[in-house]
Image (cartoon, rainbow, N blue to C red):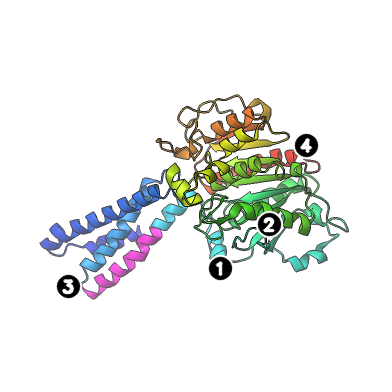
Amino acid sequence: MVTVAAVIAVVGWRSARWRLLWVPVCVAVGTLGALIAHWYMDSQGLSSDPAPGALWIWVAVFVAAVALAVIGWRGSRWWRRGLSVIAIPLSLLCVGLVLNQWVGYYPTVAAAWGAVTSGPLPDQVSADELPGLRGTSMSTGKVVPVDIPDTSSGFAHRTEYVYLPPSWFAGPTPPTLPAAMMIAGEFNTPADWMRSGNITTTVDAYANSHGGQAPILVFVDAGGSFNNDTECVDGPRGNSADHLTADVRPYVVSTFGASASPSNWGVIGWSMGGTCAVDLTVMHPDLFGSFVDIAGDLGPTSGTKEQTVDRLYGGNSAQWARFDPTTVMAAHGPYTGVSGLFEDTSASPRRGNAAHTADPGQAGNRPPPSDTAGSGYGGRDGTPDNDEKGAADALCAAATAQQVSCAVHTGAGGHTWQFAAQAFNDGLPWLATRIGVPGAAA
């Protein structure tokens, strides 16, 4: 409301030439700016979930505000000049607010401030404090920042985090616990699961109801920077897959005593991370036994298939096939002891979904939807990919054909961090049972 009032005041009544010529020009410039932003988002494959109309309206207002300030500067009174300058950051702030409402990135001002100031996460301790906590009883786990060597991958990454449940501290030595790798979306920091998703509260609650037992969680950096969309593959954007499999997993086993058995390892991912969760598990059943895919695509994607091959693999189509989960599963043949859970939104109806199936083995007899069959690049085969339409069903069908036990759960919500947090809450007990968390079946 403040921004709208400021923009109206900047426009004012002024002269007839201003009203009939320059105001329409500024409106046209703003509209063109919004159209260019819309085109750029689509061409770069930045989101498979349609942006709300309010986002483009505010982008248009922001660009128009810049035009109003430039074109209307000469001949304006000092107060209008000042207001025209103020209207620019105000309208940009509105763009950010609508964008945040769309994806649910910062649920509270405190979460946003903590991210901006790099404030400590809930229950965060340093690695040096861990020995002093050994043998103590606590009601919450602890989050430890770690700098994992990139010896095998050469992948430049940011600080990553490890959640250690209360049971990890109980005895004289760390117990051999199951572990799960946590992967966030395309635009992310390793702390997003905890700041935006607030999932440490969920894990602590689970641990409290299971005698302090919960999996070790490792919050990884799959991108290396906020806007580096690696899709967890090896390519021009970095050897992300090698980092996760050859750097992170061995480090967690050797440093925190996690089990080395693939049956005790899972991968949980949201959005891009959901795609990564499926891909890592079916490519490396010798490392991971279970996955939870929260609103992921059919496979690693960065635009159309041609754009994906170019951007992610430097034009090497063989690399596309190497990392496409449907292709990987078909080439691998029957799997043993691998299971998956797809947590999907119910915003767009999908054919054949089984909501909250009790047994993953009962949910695998759905044929892939005809509009996604044979694609494997995020559903972008000439049809809009709204809410990853059909990806969960298609992947579950392909997985079941190769004896991967799977289920598709649907829940209300959009492609937001709030849905991801709820889906994690829904999937954690399932994953804990699959990877062998002590007392998980109770």
User: Residue 247 shows which numbered tag?
Assistant: 2
Between the C-alphas of marks 1 and 4, the distance is: 40 Å
Numbered range of the magenta stretch: 76-94
At label 2, the amino acid type is Asp
Point out the tag, 1 or 4, that comes first from the N-terminus. 1
Between the C-alphas of marks 3 and 1, the distance is: 41 Å
Q: Which residue is drawn at 54% across and 56% down?
A: 188
Q: Determine the secondary structure under disc 1.
A: loop
At label 1, the amino acid type is Thr
Q: Which residue lies furthest to the right in this view?
A: 172
Which of label 4 and label 3 is nearer to you?
4
Between the C-alphas of marks 2 and 3, the distance is: 62 Å
Between the C-alphas of marks 4 and 2, the distance is: 31 Å
Q: Can residue 295 be seen in this view?
A: no
Residue placed under numbered mark 3 in the picture: 75
Residue placed under numbered mark 4 in the picture: 441
